[in-house]
Amino acid sequence: MTDDVLGFACTCGQLRGEITDISPSAYTNIVCHCEDCRSAYTHLGLADPEKVGILQTTQDRIHITQGGEFLRVFRLSAKGALRWFATCCDTPLFYTPLKPRMVHVGINTDRLDTPDAVGAVMAEGFIPAPGGKQRHKGLGRMAGRMVTRMAAKNLSGEWRNTPFFDDTNAPTVPPQVLTREERAAALMGLNRA
């Protein structure tokens, strides 16, 4: 993929946007099998995807062009990441850290207009392994790319360009923190090996 624009949308299409300045160094294509990424789907009433494709990039590259009023956020626990979704159709879209200076954002690749355009998966996390264990592939490469992007955006000041946080560094909409019961219900919806 070159320095191009990549579109995304919720399931019903009322919330739409673009990821700009997409070049191979600007993103990392990963797959995550963790319970948090998967239970973001089950909490919203969707089937367990068993793995979630994620395009990791920086928040300044995300531009919501339509339906921003439908963007809401929840946290799976009081310490959990921010899980952004579209209320019009309960579609999980993004996850971000709790602070904008972290600049990181993951967009679910099933929301991309052309998910094949991002190329091969570079890393895979929390892969189920025998004995209830988990393993990872390419974790060092993924983390290195993330830290490099974070440092560059903090040095340039571009970390301030985000659709997810306001001028006071608070989320643009107050996050809902799931209750213990809601979290348990989301986890019950996961397929266990």
Image (tube, rainbow, N blue to C red):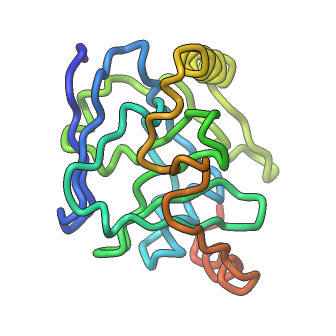
Task: Compare residues 43 and 147 and report the one nearer the observer.
Answer: 147
Q: Residue at x 43, y 13 (%)?
A: 25
- State which quadrant residue 148 falls in: top right
Task: Compare residues 16 and 116 and report the one nearer the observer.
Answer: 16
**What x and y, as percent, mark residue 151?**
63, 16
Quadrant including the C terminus? bottom right
Q: Residue at x 25, y 17 (%)?
A: 1
121 on left or right of 34: left
> Does the rendering let one see residue 138?
no
Would you place residue 117 above or below residue 114 in this image?
A: above
**What x and y, as percent, mark residue 93?**
40, 55
Q: What residue occupies the far bottom of the structure in this picture? A: 181
Task: Compare residues 102 and 89 and report the one nearer the observer.
Answer: 102
Q: Residue at x 42, y 19 (%)?
A: 26
- State which quadrant residue 85 falls in: bottom left
185 on left or right of 89: right
Q: Residue at x 22, y 53 (%)?
A: 16
Would you place residue 106 above or below residue 95 in this image?
A: above
Total marks placed: 0
**What x and y, as percent, mark residue 90?**
37, 73
62 on left or right of 8: right
77 on left or right of 107: right
> Does the rendering let one see residue 82?
yes
